[in-house]
Structures are given as C-alpha cells and as structure tokens.
Amino acid sequence: MDPADTAEHRTRPRAAAAPAVSVVMTVLDEARHLEESVGRALAQDYDGDLEVVVAVGRSSDGTREVADRLAAVGGGRVVVVENPDPRGATPAGLNAAVARARHDVLVRVDGHSMLPPGYVASAVESLLATGADNVGGVMAAEGSTWFEAVVARAMTTKLGVGSAPFHTGGSAGPAESVYLGVFRRSALERVGGYDEHYLRAQDWELNHRLRSTGGLVWFDPRLRVSYRPRSTPQALARQYFHYGRWRRAIVRRDATTVSPRYLAPPVAVLGALAGAVVGVRWRPALLLPGGYAALLVGGGALLGGGLGVRGRLALAGVYGLMHVSWGTGFLTSPRRLARAPEPGTRTG
C-alpha cells in the first residue's frame, strides 16, 4: 500500500509553507558594502521565496552600477528602483522599495547591514508566533578597520548609546523600537508607511506609530545583524549630530517620547560648557568638565578590553565625540523639524 493512502498520513497536518518575503533596502554611496549586503540577503537559509528590492539614491561612488550588476546576475531575485528623493533620503527610498516589493512579509535591511544565514527564518517564525507588526533584534556593530572596531565597541555599551536592547541586548519581549525590522505589509499600510519628513530616527518614529495604533513591536535577541560603523571621526560626528537633531524633533511632536537617556548627552554638553565658562573665574566649576572627562577616560579603560592602551584612549574620545555630537544636535535642532504630518500621509 502506498504510504500516502494510510489514515495516519491523511490525518497528519501538513507543514505550513514558509511565506514569501521581500528584502527591502535603500542605499546612497554604499558601493563599498552593497554587494556583500545583498549577497548575505540572497544566501538566507529560508524555505520560502525571497527577493531583494534595492532603492538607489543619486550616488557618486558607483553604487548604481553595483546595484545594476547585482540585478543582472541575480536571476530575477534582485530588483533595482530609483529613490525618488533627490537627497537619497532613507524613508523615501524605503517607501519606494516597499511599493515595488511583491510579497507581504517585508524584511528591512540597509547597506551597512550583513544578515546572518538564519535571520529571515528566525524573524518570520517570531513574527508568526507573536502576532507582532514588527520583529527585530540587535545591531551587532563590528568594525573592519581599527577605528571602526573602536566605534563598534562604543556602540555596544551603555556608556556609548544607553540601554536600548537593540544596542546592548536583552530578553525577548515587547520593545519601543528594534533594529531594522521584519514587518507585515498590512501594518505599514495601516500607519501610512515611513514618514518621509524624518530624515533620521525614521525607524523609531515608525515603531512609535505602530505601537500608538495598537500594534506590537517585538524584540528577539536571536536576530543579530552585523553593522559596519562609520569609518571616520567626521562621518561619525555627522551621524550622531543628525540623530540628536531628529530625536529632538520627535520629542517636540510628542513629549511622551522623552526619556533620561535622550537627555543625558545634551545635559552633559551644557554642564561641561557651563563649567568651563564659569571656571575661568570660579575654579571649582571646572569639576564639571573635568569630571566628565574623567568619566570618559575611565569608561574607555574599563570597557575597552582587548583594544590596547591606544584603543582605550581612542574609545574615550569616541564616547565624547558621540555624546557631544548627539547633544549638540539635540540642543540646536530647529523647531521646523517637528512639524506634524497629516494623519495617514507621507510627508516630503
């Protein structure tokens, strides 16, 4: 008798087919990392159909040529679209990639992200098990140069970036935000997609809207994605300056989003600056900038294990650069950045 005709076989539940997924990313001047990032996405150990949709901004380093070559050899699994924003802004590119994507499970990746082989399978499993709108994990910063390695250490410690689980890890559960994200298309459509007004902090802002409309954002520590930090002090300073600027915009729009970890950098900047100015005439005030400097040096020494003496000193400097850049951006953020969009619309 054919085993397929047995009663046992007829009553055994069939395994559900893995849902098809679209990996969406937007890139600008990412020629250095794009091929590896797309390659990691295509190499996923996943049973369902998978495509990669890349929205390319107006790059000057050959990013479009790399993307077109990947599409040409991708066997239809890589699709390239234009980022409609002339600045190559991230939210506009992501909305364009989502609009072109064919599937209902959307895996957000960026040009600095390197997915491990089981990422999509684990994320989809978690998405289905929790009923979440968005599932994500840890930004596992890893450097390929000496400076990037120091920045990576700073980006994975509480002194550098606070206690957010997607930076420092933690237990699985509901979260304010997660790194990247694996979304249900219906959830993105419910809140109108990424808000194109937010040139930075758009992931946090999107997750805030998902939660505000009753959705669940779920942190899964199994989902660790390698992230390549900025490769120069200047690029790192610009990145954190704009993070601070746009975080202030979100706080202005919704005061309930403020938290002590967002206020710590601007308070440190103001305290150190005030202490230095007052200390010209009243020396005890110099304890403020001096104490802050001692905190940075001590933190670099304590948290810089394996980096050597030079690396520990550099780590202290990187902590200061990140704090001052973020804090300065927060303090100088113009009020116009906080304008509220019309409900359910994408602003540009």
Image (tube, rainbow, N blue to C red):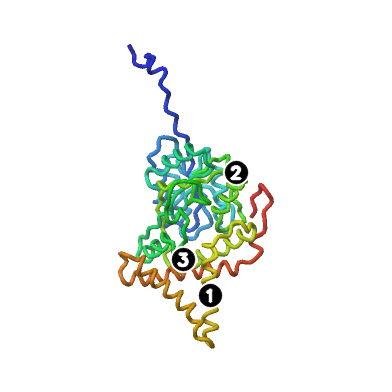
3D distance between C-alphas at marks 3 and 2: 35 Å
What residue would you read off at disc 1?
Answer: 271
Nearer the N terminus, badge 3 or badge 2?
A: 2
The relative height of residue 15 versus residue 258 in the rendered view (above or below) is above
Which of the 4 quarters of the picture holds residue 255?
Answer: bottom right
What residue would you read off at disc 3?
Answer: 236
What residue would you read off at disc 2?
Answer: 214
Label 2 is placed on what type of residue? Gly
| Image x and y of residue 27, in percent | 49, 54
- Work out whether residue 43 or residue 107 is closer to the camera in this orientation and state it: 107
Which element type, helix, strand or loop, lies under badge 1?
helix
The relative height of residue 266 versus residue 172 in the rendered view (above or below) is below
Give the residue at x 59% y 55%: 85
Regarding residue 53, the answer to whether it shows in the image is no
Give the residue at x 46% y 60%: 61
- Residue 250 located left or right of residue 326: right
Which element type, helix, strand or loop, lies under badge 2?
loop
Nearer the N terminus, badge 2 or badge 1?
A: 2
| Image x and y of residue 190, in percent | 62, 42
Nearer the N terminus, badge 1 or badge 3?
A: 3
| Image x and y of residue 72, in percent | 44, 44
Label 1 is placed on what type of residue? Gly
Q: Which image quadrant: the C terminus?
A: bottom right
Q: Which image quadrant: the N terminus?
A: top left
Local crowd at mark 3 within 10 Å, few (<14), some, or many (≥20)?
some
- Farthest residue, direction front: 284
Q: Which mark is residue 197?
A: none
Label 3 is placed on what type of residue? Leu
Give the residue at x 67% y 56%: 340
Give the residue at x 54% y 52%: 203
3D distance between C-alphas at marks 2 and 1: 39 Å
Which element type, helix, strand or loop, lies under badge 3?
helix
